Image (cartoon, helix red, strand yellow):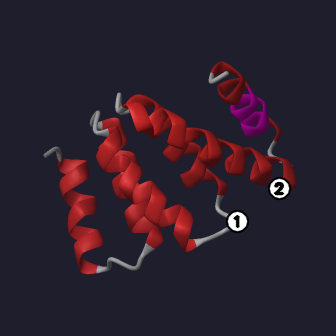
Amino acid sequence: MNDRVARFTALVTSQPENPLFRFSLAQALDDAGQPAAAAQHYQICADARADWMMPRVLLGKALLRTGKPGDRAAARPVLEEALALAIAQDHQDPAIELSGLLASLD
């Protein structure tokens, strides 16, 4: 376990309801090449706030990288939800990126 993962694991253990600690742990796991583990934490963050776009963006991307057959299909609705939030919140660059990701799934 690298230092960043260890640090955020300890913070999540001490405050499991803190979505920012959990989001940071998910990013650390993702950066450490553990997309499946990261996806679990991104999902918890997405569930914590209906309007939080970034956990959905990163969850969708992580699901695409796990290599598990069902995860690729599971990524589509997550990315679609992230795109809807990006459009609603006027985040143009993420909307463009998400549109491209979704088109590549076809």
Q: Quadrant of the C terminus?
A: top right
Identify the residue at horizontal 72%, vertical 23% (top origin).
103
Query: Rounded to the nearest whole Å, what is the CA distance between mark 2 and mark 1?
Result: 9 Å
Q: Position of residue 12 (x, y in %)?
A: 29, 70
In this picture, residue 49 sits left or right of residue 96: left
Q: Position of residue 62 (x, y in %)?
A: 44, 38
Q: Please identify the quarter of the rendering in which residue 15 is found.
A: bottom left
> The residue tagged with tag 2: helix, strand or loop?
loop
Q: Please identify the quarter of the rendering in which residue 105 is found.
A: top right
Q: Please identify the quarter of the rendering in which residue 30 is found.
A: top left
Q: Position of residue 94 (x, y in %)?
A: 72, 38
Identify the residue at horizontal 54%, vertical 68% (top origin).
47
In this picture, residue 85 sits left or right of residue 105: right
Residue 43 versus residue 91: which sits nearer the camera? 43
Q: Earlier in the sequence, mark 2 or mark 1?
A: 1
Label 1 crowd bin: few (<14), some (14–19), many (20+), radius 10 Å:
some
Circles 2 and 1: CB atoms closer than 8 Å: yes
Identify the residue at horizontal 30%, vertical 48% (top origin).
37
Identify the main secondary structure in magenta: helix
Q: Is residue 37 above or below residue 9?
A: above
Q: Which residues are magenta?
A: 93-99
Q: Which residue is mark 1?
A: 51
Amino acid type assigned to the residue bearing label 2 in the image: Gln
Identify the residue at horizontal 37%, vertical 55% (top origin).
40
Label 2 crowd bin: few (<14), some (14–19), many (20+), radius 10 Å:
few
Q: Which residue is mark 2?
A: 89
Q: Position of residue 7 (x, y in %)?
A: 22, 59
